Amino acid sequence: MEEVLDCNGKALQTGDTIVVTKDLKVRGTSTVIKRGTKVKNIRLNGNPGEIEGKTPKVKHLVLRSEFEKKA
């Protein structure tokens, strides 16, 4: 499994907490994940650069690691 890096180049692991660094539109909804939103207990899904997590607004997300930083 490849190492997944955040926008600052730090390695991410399953269970980490990340912070969104850019406002992100969620596909299929009118919801926006605002900059500064924390996503706790992330999961790495095996695809390089992708992270799974959940927020209070959206229960299941797949996020690109280039828009996240380790909290």
Image (cartoon, rainbow, N blue to C red):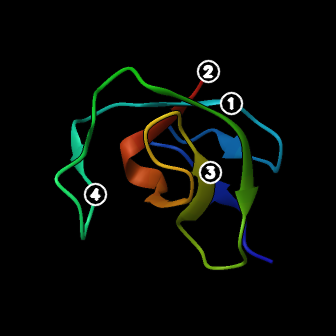
The residue positioned 16% from the left and 53% from the top of the image is 30
Rendered image: mark on residue 53:
3
The residue positioned 28% from the left and 29% from the top of the image is 34
Crowding near the residue tagged with mark 4, few <14, some 14–19, many ≥20 C-alpha atoms within 10 Å: some
Crowding near the residue tagged with mark 2, few <14, some 14–19, many ≥20 C-alpha atoms within 10 Å: few
Per the image, the residue denoted by label 1 is: 17
Crowding near the residue tagged with mark 3, few <14, some 14–19, many ≥20 C-alpha atoms within 10 Å: many
The residue positioned 72% from the left and 78% from the top of the image is 46
Mark 3: amino acid: Gly
Mark 4: amino acid: Val
Per the image, the residue denoted by label 2 is: 71
Q: Earlier in the sequence, mark 3 or mark 4?
A: 4
Crowding near the residue tagged with mark 1, few <14, some 14–19, many ≥20 C-alpha atoms within 10 Å: some
Task: Give coordinates of residue 57: x percent, y percent.
Answer: 43, 38
Contact (Cβ within 8 Å) of mark 3 with mark 2:
no
- Who is closer to the viewer here, 71 or 4? 71
How far apart in space, not on screen, are marks 3 and 1 (Cα)? 9 Å
Rendered image: mark on residue 33:
none
Q: Is residue 7 above or below residue 50?
A: above
Mark 2: amino acid: Ala
